[in-house]
Every structure is written in C-alpha cells, then in structure tokens.
Image (spheres, helix red, strand yellow):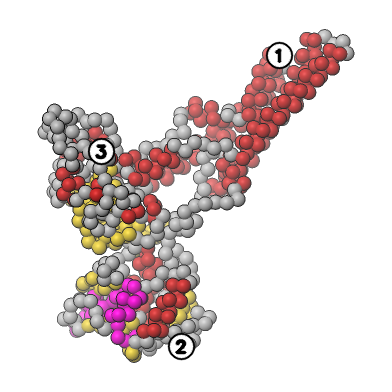
Amino acid sequence: MRPRHHGEDPALPTRARAAPRPEPSSTGRQPDAVPDPAHHGLPVHEVVLLLETDAARGLGQAEVARRRAQFGANELPRSRGGGIARKLGRQFNNPLVYVLLAAAAVTVVLGAFLDAGVILAVVLVNTLIGFVQEVRAEAALDALHSLVRTHATVMRGGERRQVPSEDLVPGDLVLLEAGDKVPADLRLVRLSALRADESALTGESDPVPKDEVVLPPVTPVADRRNMLYSGTLVTAGTGAGVVVAIGGETELGEIHRLMGTVRPVATPLTVKLARFSSTLTIAILALAAVAFLAGLAHGEQPGQMFTAAVALAVGAIPEGLPAAVTVTLAIGVRRMARRRAVVRRLPVVETLGSTTVICSDKTGTFTENQMTVRALWTPSGTYDVTGSGYGPEGRIAPSAAQHTGGRQHVADSAEHPADGDAALQWSLLGGAACNDATVRREGQGWHVRGDPTEAAMLVAAGKGGMDVSGFLAANPRKQELPFTSERQFMATLHLSTLPHGAGVVFVKGAAERVLDLCGTEMDRYGANRPLHRQAALNAAHALADSGLRVLATAMMRLPRTAGLSPPSNCGAG
C-alpha cells in the first residue's frame, strides 16, 4: 500500500471503481486508492484495510448507501443496438436497397409515381421484416438477462441479510455455501472445504478447491485459488469473501466489454449481395447508355432517349430480390427459434449455414456441463448406466462382458440389477448418502445445487431403485469428514433412529485412497471377503482409460456409541 500524501483526495481501488473520483464522505475518509490492485496478491487484512470494511461485521448501512450512490448497481452494462432510428437505419444498409432507392428517386423525377410507389413498398416491407426480427431478438435476450438475477447473503452492520445481487457494493462481506451463485468478484477471507465451478469463466468443468493463500500478482485468473468470480458457482463447502469488484469491473464484465468491442464482420451473404449489386448496377447503366447512344444514332430526340434509358434501367432492377432474401432468412430465424437459438441479425442465419469449421470451448457449449454416471464396478460384476444429464430417465443393466479383474460373473436379470447385488446396492447408497448435492425439477429441466459429480451419483442411485430419502430419514447424518485435497475422500456417519440401531460410515473418494482404507470387499450376497486390491485397481484403470472419471465408495458398520474418524477397515462397495 502506498502512503497517503497530505491533502490528496482518497478513493476506492481502481479495480473496484465504477465512477469518477468520489466526493469525500461525511467522515472525511474513504478507502485508499492503489493502481489496479491485485487483490489475490495481498493478505486478507490488507484487502480489508484497502476497502475499509470489516471481515466479521461487514459494512454499515450508511456506508453501503454512500457506495451504492458512488458506484451504481452491480449489473453488467447492457449492449444496446441503439434506438429505433438506428435499428431502422441498419435495415437500409444493403447495396440492393441503395439501388432501389435511387431507382425510386429517378421514377419520381420522371413522374412515374406508381412505379415509385411499388419500389418504395418493397423497400418498406424489407425494412419492417428486419426491424421486427431485431426487436424480437433483443426482447428475448433481455428476458434471458433477467433470469440470471440472484440474491446474495451478506453481513451488514453485524447482521446477516438477504439482498438482491445488484445491491452489492465494493467492501460488502458476502457469505456463501454450496449451490450459491457468486454475485461479484470476491477475495476470500475465510472458508471451509470450499470448491467452485468456474466453467462459465475458464471452461474448466472440474470444481476448483479454494484456500486463503496469498498468490503472486501475476497469477492468471484460472489459478487464483483465493478468489471467487462473478458468475461462477459454489459446489461444496462454505466461505465468506469481501467484494472487490462489481458490474462491469468484474472479470466477467471484462469479457463483456471485450465482446462489445468486436466489430461486425460482413457475412458471406452480404458480401455476395454487394458484389452482385455492383455488377448489376454497372451492367444496367451500361445497357442504358448503349440504348441511349443507339437512339441518338437513329436520329431520336435526346430527351426522349434519356427517358427511355432511365425506364429501361428501372425496369431491369430486381425489386423483389431484397424482400425475397429477407423473407427467406426470416424463415430460417423462426426455425432456429423453435430449436431455442436466438438470432439477432438476419444474415447470421446464412453465415451459420456456410460454416465449415467451428473452434469453440467444449464445456457448456457443445456439452451441457452435466455429469452422468456411465459405468459401475463391484467385486461381483460390472454394469452400464443409460440416460444422460440429471433427468431420471435411464436404467442400470449388466454389461455384455463383465470384467472383474480376471473374474467373470453374469448378473441375474431384474428390473433393478441392484436387487441381486448387495455390493451394488451399498455402492449406490453410499454415493448418494455421502453427498451434499441436491437435484430438483424446475419447469422443464432439472436444477443442481452442489457438486455436479455428486449430483450424478444421486441420479444413478435413483436409476438403481434406491430409496435414498427413506434411508436418510431412518439413518440421519450425524457427523462428516469433508473432502480435502490432502484427505482425498469424504466420509459421513449415519445413526439409526431405532433405540438399539447401529451406525454406518460411508466413504467416497479417489480409488487408490479408498482402497488404502479397506481390508475387505463385499460380495453380491453382502458377505465380506478379503480385498482383491489388484482387481479393483485394474477395473479403475480400465474405466479411466475409457475417458471416465473414477470414484470409489466404501462402507463400514459401527456401534451406536462410536464416533467418526478416518476409517481403517471398510467393506468395499
């Protein structure tokens, strides 16, 4: 932090600045200004001092009101295509329309008002179709913009409050838990097993573990473990962070700004139409000139030949071509709209049809960024899981050739194969019970709160016929060991509600780590037998080689009086 010189007017950090230099507050003090501070490169206490906030109580209401007046709302600036006049003007930006307007002007001069009216009517229809389409597209985009509004949990004056995300100001203390959408750029001040899905910002689908470590200022955005960024999603754990940037000053706002600087590029259709219009205009003018000179050579009056040449030129212009092109593109727009694709400008439809190579980030673009369990392995057999995404459609079926580390087994046919394989039952139940995610239906889709991988395990349990809710009601969770990068597994303790019921521990994590904790494996009848470690490792490697992410589950029964500690001996599921 630089020293403050006598008499200078301090302001909030440049990175958080959303307005010109502010007026002094009633207290005469405002947060220090530093040139583009790298908040990830500063200790927490320096960030708190820089923003003049409180890491425990947050900002007071009076200070929040002052900063909101200074910085405005926490919203991305909307890209507007201009007013009605500009939208209408864009519809005339077409070489063929220029030719038609010139032809209409000439016919008016010559007194052919009917022809002029027909030409202007064609231009008007063409303009209205393009204008209406652009207005509808912007209305659809505005509707999508309103859907992303969220609420944030903040500490203000020591009180926990729920506020609209657009009301956040630099220095606000935001509280987060699994399933929350990050409402602004935050510097984390405290956390517990916090992980975030940053695919919206970086394209990386794996949740990123967070910590409070101070990082070098040159650390790229994707590696800033002590920061949370607007638009990302908390998938696990809890945390609190101080707002360091809002609205257009966030990393997401920077992307928004860069997108706004992209200059429109002429589409293949507009290029071809411009070339055709130029060629057509030259050809028509040449023919008109030839007709004019031919008439003069035959002794006709110059005035009459000029009128005849202009009439020939106007008659040769294809007045219906612009309207035909516009109507055809509008039909394409409607077809794309039925497939939930919003097209703002009509020529984009033809451009997409002319595309031969598309280079794009995969996650959330070509894929839906939804995890799906595809295969299951137990000591008794292997299973395939059908369906995709978080919907309940699909089933678990024995694989055609079940490889179990050199051992073969053919499972019994049943509506739910788990009914005939106790190890599969416990594996599905363990993955769903040792789990902090939720999946619920919203409208026509399914909404996930928490880690996508854990959500996929919930869905797989449902496909296997597991009554997870019933189990948790009879065996509520009493303790848990959250997943950490050092531990590499998560564990939960569930105790029966019956007076003399026992407890059960579920473990979920990296295959090698879970196997280190286990001494036995469970057969299809529920009996324990010595662990065949190499067979399990071979199965895990085979699944990983096929492009799947591999997790292992385990369980162990405990006396009712036992507590949860890292298990040393489990029955593998």
Q: Decide: is 265 above or below 363.
A: above
Type of the residue with mark 1: Gly
Q: Is residue 190 left or right of residue 551?
A: left
Please report contact status of discs 1 and 2: CB closer than 8 Å, yes or no: no
Q: Name the residue under label 3.
A: 35
CA distance separating discs 1 and 2: 95 Å
Mark 1 nearby-residue class (10 Å; few <14, some 14–19, many ≥20):
few
Chain part drawn in magenta:
493-522
Q: Nearer the viewer, residue 349 or 324?
A: 349
Q: Is residue 517 magenta?
A: yes
Q: Does the magenta stretch include residue 122?
A: no
Mark 3 nearby-residue class (10 Å; few <14, some 14–19, many ≥20):
few
CA distance separating discs 3 and 1: 68 Å
Type of the residue with mark 3: Pro
Q: Decide: is 133 above or below 486.
A: above
Q: Where is residue 76 in the image (x, y as percent from the top left)?
A: 35, 40
Residue visible at 34% across and 45% down in the picture:
251
Please report contact status of discs 3 and 2: CB closer than 8 Å, yes or no: no
Type of the residue with mark 2: Arg
Q: Mark 2 points at which residue?
A: 407
Q: Which mark is residue 197?
A: none
Q: Mark 1 points at which residue?
A: 111
- Please report whichever mark, 1 or 2, sits nearer to the chain's N-terminal start: 1
